[in-house]
Amino acid sequence: MTEQHQPVPAPLHRPRRLRTTPAMRRLVAETSLSPDQLVLPVFIREGLSEPRPISSMPGVVQHTRKSLLAAVTEAAELGLGGVMLFGVPETRDATGSGALDPSGVLNLAITDVVAEVGDALTVMSDLCLDEFTDHGHCGVLGSDGRVDNDRTLALYAEMARAQAHAGVDVVGPSGMMDGQVRVVREALDASEHTDVSILAYSAKYASAFYGPFREAVDSTLEGDRRTYQQDPANVREGVREAQLDVAEGADVVMVKPALAYLDVVRAVREAVSVPVAAYNISGEYAMVEAAAEYGWIDREQAILETLTSIRRAGADIVLTYWASEAARLLAR
Ligand code: PBG
């Protein structure tokens, strides 16, 4: 049977020419992805004798001191840009005092990691109280049960000093308290830590995608963070938050989560001149891992496509639990 289609005009333009071979596709790629741009978030849990798997984040663990050093050494060998440390203490209280204690789990881990890989990697630490408070909020609570912004700031200032004293390169204030960047900058400068940088979690949204992280840090949070984290409906507000943080002294601003907020990444990238980071968070990781586990998607391709999309949206730096693995995939 012969086909009876009407003759159609030949295309005037053939964009497919630029897709013909792998070398051609590499040549014209608009977006690059390299290990230097990736930061690996890691969890260190006080009192563990073995690394403990996080069931909602397959492949991610709560580290012991020893396994943490192995993970960051590998990260350095793979040429990553940095690591972001989260501490999970054994005991918690209303004001999160373990965060300020020089011998608290996070501060000790900073010193350990800097001693091990400080020349090869940028060492960053989460500057927030939620892992250290018994109620799981990012600050101290007022008599009305809400997070008291201004009383929390004083604790962030002290936490910043403690982390800087422990040797960290970059602090990451992630609690979404108004004025936190200014207070942290002043605390660092007043304690002769003028070279410690601030990566501000500027546009941080109250997101369902943080779910698996709550298991990662044994969170005790009840309720939500909607009175301090942003409403997912807003993009201009995210830009404003980033601009305020730059004005307060942020060296790098961050958008978080990444995937459901790629438009915010783009808008922030266009609005500021400091580097922009985006955090490919726990729920985004878990979705890909779960779908791959079911055989529904190609895991490795999905990882690289996800990270490329965040870079394409305008992120200079990407925080991702796949950082080490992505570096390995990129090397082949
Ligand atoms: C707060 C903090 C959170 C994450 C990073 N820092 C949790 C929250 O705000 O509820 C989430 C990271 C992730 O989900 O991967 N210290």
Image (tube, rainbow, N blue to C red):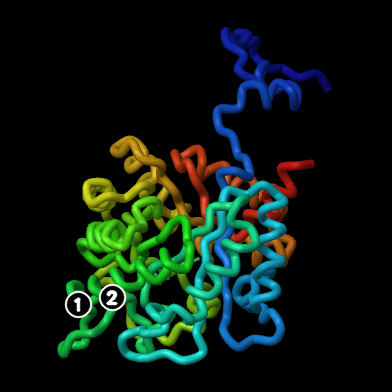
Pointer 1 local density, CA inside 10 Å: few below 14, some 14–19, many at least 20: few
Q: Which residue is mark 1?
A: 151
Q: Foreground residue, 195 or 248?
A: 195
Q: Which residue is mark 2?
A: 155
Above or below — where is 20 with respect to 152? above
Seen at 49% across and 59% down, the residue is 124
Q: Foreground residue, 258 or 41?
A: 41
Mark 2 touches mark 1? (CB < 8 Å): yes
**Which quarter of the figure is the C terminus placed in?**
top right
Q: Position of residue 253 (x, y in %)?
A: 36, 49
Disc 2 residue type (three-letter) = Leu
Seen at 31% across and 86% down, the residue is 95
Above or below — where is 180 with respect to 325? below
Above or below — where is 50 with respect to 181? below
Residue 325 shows which numbered tag?
none
Q: Position of residue 183 (x, y in %)?
A: 23, 62
* Left or right of 6, for residue 250: left
Q: Position of residue 254 (x, y in %)?
A: 39, 52
